[in-house]
Image (cartoon, helix red, strand yellow):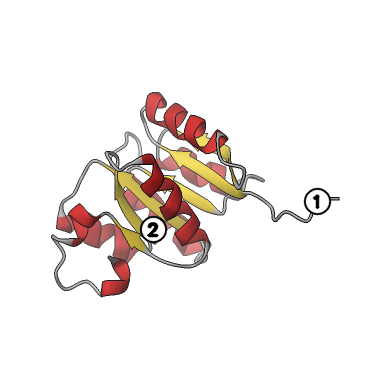
Amino acid sequence: MSSDPSPIRILSVDDHALIRQGIAGLVATQTDMTVVAEAANGREAIQQFHSSHRPDITLMDLQMPEMNGLDAIIAIRAEFPEARIVVLTTYAGDVQALRALKAGARAYLLKDSLHKELLATIRAVQAGRKSMSPEVSFRLPNMPLTMR
């Protein structure tokens, strides 16, 4: 019987299969994480969240067909307020970041972040902390320092 804690269970949500595959490949190299489900849009994300896959961390793109990431965050957090969601997007704009954070995202990262930053953010959010890409935090001067 192992005394190791359970790995962090991750739901990867992005409309680009290549991004989901890249995340799965990166996470597969980590002993403390596992991708338990993937989704290509917000509707699928909600379905996967409801399933037995109940993730610890959800990596959520914002711009997707059928249902965008912001609407999915709102829907998931309405039913599961403890859900830990990390936005992983190409949009560094302050409006997008503020909307996602107000909807309940715990972190906001840009897709061009280094893989070490993504892994560190997943671990930080799992531990109850918040995180934001430096490029985004500079655009939000009124955000509390704990978000930077």
Location of residue 141 (image quadrant)? bottom left
How many residues crowd around disc 2 within 10 Å: few (fewer than 14), some, or many (20 or more)?
some
Name the amino acid, label 1.
Ser
The residue that disc 2 covers is: 74
Indicate left or right for 106 with 9 as reference.
Answer: left
Residue under the image location 20 percent in, 61 percent down:
137
Left or right side of 31 for 12: left
- Residue 9 on image: x %, y %: 59, 47
Callout 2 amino acid: Ile
Residue marked by disc 1: 2
Of 102 and 91, nearer the camera is 91
Q: Residue furthest top?
A: 18
Per the image, label 2 sits on a secondary structure element best described as helix
- Tell me the quarter of the picture where residue 10 sits: top right
Sequence-wise first label, 1 or 2:
1
Query: Considering the image in quadrants, where does the C terminus appear?
Result: bottom left
Mark 1 element type = loop
Q: Give the answer, above or below, for where 7 lies relative to 15.
A: below
* Closest to the observer, 6 or 68: 6
Question: Which residue is at the front of the view, 91 or 147?
Answer: 147
Q: Quadrant of residue 20?
A: top left
Q: Separation of disc 1 and disc 2 at Cα?
A: 37 Å
Residue 52: x and y in percent read 67, 46
Closest to the observer: 115 or 108? 115
Q: Is residue 2 left or right of residue 12?
A: right
Total numbered circles: 2
Q: Residue at x 46, y 60 (%)?
A: 125
